[in-house]
């Protein structure tokens, strides 16, 4: 009987436990303990249901083109719950000079698939529009001059489109997803598909146009009708109850001839394998006594996020522009990082006639909000929204969540560090590193990694 410890009960830890439970059901000789330091499972995935509002406290969806979250949902019997974003009305705005300017239709992150749509856009200057058009003609130059070494997201975007595009959409888009300054983020780690496009086509615009013509994907985002927490709940229901230990903080980990030893307040237990699915900061501290050379490879910046959800009973009381929400470029005169118009992005999120918005603070603003109480945080969020959208009525529901150091920042050279880290991990038999600090930050990435690791452990049992 192979004993497996899973440390951390977020999405990665739960997906690992779920897959191990499946393997055990199919005959694998496994005994599993999932240690979760807090009193709840799911990590930053949490859905609040109140007054017919469905409010996500963490991620509200996954990227449709990554199949692993959808596959898991369907396997868990949630196929009827899977719901696409309302992409027929998808529009995103950017705060420029205190006004919301719409991004042109057909944008794939920083890359336009429809150059004609640029003509009617007020977001970009004539120089920036010309830079987009010129990029197509520079295809061979860009392909031949693509650097062999990693570079920052800022350098990559500037080479293709210039400083204005970086400031207006590159920085707010990527800072929101990956948390961190684009001047430090690794382009190979956070924009790998675009790096591959450059190597093949040179021009990102040409590559995106070719992919759009061949793609059958109609929506960018996918979620669950009853909320993302349903995915967590179904995984928990499929895991043997006696595998799960809540309020069970792991205090130390050691490795030697006897295998892995895990220490908690209840005592010390021996395991054959350890799946480390805690935040990378915590994993580094636990593993430093095991392998001192591993710890520096796990050092990385991480940014915090504060989410404030507002539910309004009557959308007619104030107007928001049509679309999914807006981004705030760094350096703007606003503490906000972004805002989502949830009821326009997804169906079935509000009572009839209602409105739901989520405001986000990141970076230094999030660190400031971390020190504020819920009432003060909500008041600041409402004030910042009102400065952009106009006066807001009193919300029926307010939800505030703080996620400290929840977004690890993949700095330049991240992939090389992860390769070196993987070599250290291989030298320690039975260790697996899971979570958003290594090979992707989205729910599909975490599910893919965790289930693959669990299957490998089961094969070795």
Image: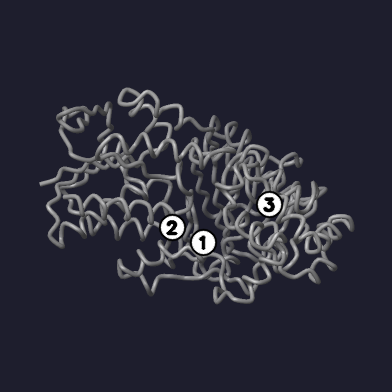
Question: Considering the numbered disc 2 on the image, is that residue within a helix, a strand or a loop?
Answer: helix
Q: Residue furthest front?
A: 144
Q: Residue 327 carries which label?
A: 3
User: CA separation, marks 1 and 2?
Assistant: 8 Å
Q: Do the residues labelled 1 and 2 touch (CB within 8 Å)?
A: yes
Q: Which residue lies furthest to the right in this view?
A: 126
Question: Considering the numbered disc 1 on the image, is that residue within a helix, a strand or a loop?
Answer: strand
Q: Which residue is drawn at 20% across and 30% down?
A: 261
Of callouts 3 and 2, the N-terminal one: 3
Residue 314 visible (yes or no):
yes
- Residue 282 x, y percent position in the rendering: 38, 32
Does 73 sit left or right of 24 as displayed? right
- Residue 155 x, y percent position in the rendering: 71, 43
Q: Residue 444 carries which label?
A: 2
362 w.r.t. 101: above or below: above
Front position in the image: 438 or 55 = 438
- Residue 51 x, y percent position in the rendering: 45, 61
Q: Which colour scheme is used?
A: one colour
Q: Which residue is drawn at 48% across and 63% down?
A: 66
């Amino acid at each position: 009987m192979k004993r497996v410890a899973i440390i951390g009960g977020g999405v990665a830890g739960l997906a690992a436990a779920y897959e191990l439970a499946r393997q055990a059901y199919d005959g694998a000789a496994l005994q599993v303990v999932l240690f979760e330091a807090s009193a709840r499972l799911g990590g930053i995935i949490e859905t609040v249901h109140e007054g017919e509002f469905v409010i996500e406290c963490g991620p509200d969806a996954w990227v449709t083109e990554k199949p692993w979250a959808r596959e898991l949902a369907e396997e868990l019997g949630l196929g009827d719950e899977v719901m696409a974003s309302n992409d027929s009305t998808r529009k995103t705005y950017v705060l420029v000079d205190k006004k919301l300017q719409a991004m042109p239709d057909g944008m794939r992150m920083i890359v336009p698939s429809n150059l004609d749509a640029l003509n009617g856009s007020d977001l970009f200057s004539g120089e920036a529009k010309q830079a987009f058009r010129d990029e197509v003609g520079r295809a061979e130059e860009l392909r031949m001059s693509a650097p062999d070494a990693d570079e920052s997201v800022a350098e990559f975007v500037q080479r293709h489109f210039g400083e204005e595009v970086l400031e207006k959409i590159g920085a707010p888009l990527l800072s929101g997803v990956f948390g961190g300054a684009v001047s430090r983020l690794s382009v190979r780690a956070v924009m790998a598909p675009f790096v591959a496009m450059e190597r093949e086509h040179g021009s990102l615009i040409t590559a995106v146009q070719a992919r759009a013509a061949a793609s059958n994907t109609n929506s960018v985002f996918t979620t669950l009708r009853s909320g993302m927490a349903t995915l967590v709940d179904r995984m928990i229901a499929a895991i043997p109850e006696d595998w799960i230990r809540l309020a069970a903080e792991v205090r130390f980990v050691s490795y030697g001839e006897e295998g892995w030893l895990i220490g908690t307040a209840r005592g010390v237990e021996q395991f054959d394998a350890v799946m480390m699915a805690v935040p990378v900061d915590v994993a580094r501290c636990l593993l430093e006594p095991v392998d001192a050379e591993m710890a520096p490879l796990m050092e990385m910046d991480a940014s915090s996020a504060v989410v404030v959800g507002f539910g309004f009973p009557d959308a007619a009381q104030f107007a928001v522009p049509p679309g999914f929400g807006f981004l705030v470029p760094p350096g703007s005169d606003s503490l906000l990082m972004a805002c989502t118009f949830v009821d326009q992005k997804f169906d079935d999120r509000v009572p009839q006639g209602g409105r739901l918005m989520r405001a986000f603070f990141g970076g230094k603003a999030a660190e400031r909000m971390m020190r504020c109480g819920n009432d003060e945080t909500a008041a600041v969020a409402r004030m910042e929204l009102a400065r952009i959208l106009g006066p807001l009525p009193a919300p029926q529901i307010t939800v505030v969540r703080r996620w400290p150091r929840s977004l690890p920042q993949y700095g330049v050279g991240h992939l090389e560090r992860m390769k070196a880290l993987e070599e250290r991990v291989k030298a320690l038999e039975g260790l697996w590193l899971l979570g958003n600090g290594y090979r992707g930050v989205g729910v599909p990435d975490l599910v893919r990694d965790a289930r693959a690791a669990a299957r490998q452990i089961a094969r070795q049992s």
